[in-house]
Image (cartoon, rainbow, N blue to C red):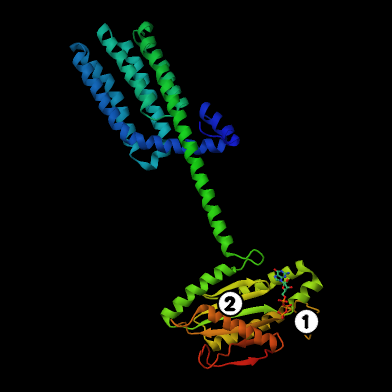
Amino acid sequence: MAETDPRSRRVVVPGVRWLRFPRRLEAEYREYQCLEAVDSFRVNAFYILVLYLLLVTGIYALAPEDVRGLWLGTYIWVGIIVMLAGILAQFRALDRYFPVYAGAGSFLAVMLSMAIPGFLEEPGSIQLANVSVIYALVIVYAMVGLRFPVAALVCWAGGLLGWGIAEQFGRGIDWQVAHRTYTGISLLGMFLCYTEEVRGRLLFFNQRQLVRQQQRTQSLAERLHRLSREDSLTGLANRRYFDEALDREWRRCQRERQPLTVMLVDVDLFKSYNDHYGHLQGDECLRALADELRRYSRRGGDLVARFGGEEFVLLYPGVDETEAARLASRLCRTVRALGLTHAHNPPSGEVTISVGVAVTMPMENRSAIKLLDAADQALYQAKQSGRDSWRLYEPPPTVRLVRENGVRKDD
Ligand SMILES: Nc1nc2c(ncn2[C@@H]2O[C@H](COP(=O)(O)OP(=O)(O)OP(=O)(O)O)[C@@H](O)[C@H]2O)c(=O)[nH]1
């Protein structure tokens, strides 16, 4: 047992050694074991049948002529049982009943094998019949795939019943021989079956641990991936994710010949807000603003991110100046309508924002950084014009990022 974790040891030691896991795990194991067993039995039934035919033909050749008919008449039932179990195993819908039909079949096969010697007279035939008990036990313990307690139960119960039938209705059993065949092989079979189950349980437990470990690692990796893209205070995308998105959308808009809009949003006089209400209240304010801004991402490529500090950034692929102006104006109004008190932000006395907007047609000879820079300049102009306003970037004549410009006080 390579398991070192003490918690796992507490489960795996009794689960493997004493063949009993805690309740839920045990149920899981039994389901797994049943499916594994029936899967093997689908094939093993064929080999068991071949072994059985070898046994029958061998016995047929060796048995005295006058008892051959009796041999076949009684032994044919073991073959029929194996065949029936093999046929049932082919129906996947019956898989969960495998322990029932395989257990019942094994019980009958052992019972018949054990009873038959009690009905024979000729010593040679009796010896051959005892050999067939060995076959039956080895097959049930080692090839059918029953769990250890089930296999032991059906073999001992089947043997006892067969013995009872032989004693009651036949000539009885020679225990000198039976001990060397039935008892000895039963003990050997139990040992084989037990070690096989220990191996199976260990394999099951280790596989399960491995799958759980993989799941844990995967969910950790997903969490880390999400955290690496998320701003911890607001839950919005962070700057790193924004940079990636900007780069991606820039190339997409360039391919599709569409405009790309960037809006930088800055909370007005936020230092005074922090000084007056405290940093924690400042955090609350940023969260409230983030929740509001989040609703401004409406389509696939749109993105709202925290740019850093008290600054947010919005990315809109396919949005031109007219629509950008409409959005920026609505944004200012929405924040004002939130009614977050800001005693040091005259004249409204409420939290307001300034927005810098830049729109461009992405091209080979332009760069996304310049677009951001343009939005920053527009934001600066909005601040200069008295805050609580938005401004569209006004490009120098040589670099026409936008066609129209103007300072607009939003009201
Ligand atoms: N509570 C809180 N405050 C922050 C956070 N990040 C940045 N700030 C504060 O935001 C304030 C930004 O102030 P400034 O850049 O001086 O600008 P301002 O006071 O908003 O003035 P204008 O931008 O000119 O309107 C600083 O006091 C920062 O400490 C944060 O995560 N939480």
Q: Residues within 10 Å of mark 1 (few under 14, many from 20)?
A: some
Residue at image coords 51%, 85%: 360
Does label 2 point to a residue whose CB lies under 8 Å from ligand 1?
Answer: no
Residue 351, compared with residue 149, is above or below; it is below
Residue at image coords 31%, 24%: 78
Q: Which residue is mark 2?
A: 314
Among the 4 quarters of the image, the one containing residue 135:
top left
Residue 369 spot, x, y in % from top left: 53, 78
Residue 235 spot, x, y in % from top left: 63, 66
Residue 72 spot, x, y in % from top left: 24, 20
Which of 386/168 is in front?
A: 386
Q: CA distance from mark 2 to mark 1?
A: 24 Å
Does label 1 point to a residue whose CB lies under 8 Å from ligand 1?
Answer: no
Q: Secondary structure at mark 2?
A: strand
Residue 154, compared with residue 31, is above or below; it is above
Residue 21, compared with residue 243, is above or below; it is above
Q: Quadrant of ligand 1?
A: bottom right
Q: Which residue is mark 1?
A: 345
The answer to whether marks 2 and 1 mark residues whose Cβ atoms lie closer than 8 Å is no
Residue at image coords 59%, 80%: 263
Q: Is residue 216 left or right of residue 256?
A: right
Looking at the figure, which quarter contains the C terminus? Answer: bottom right
Q: Secondary structure at mark 1?
A: loop
* Residue type at the position of mark 1: Asn
* Residue type at the position of mark 2: Leu
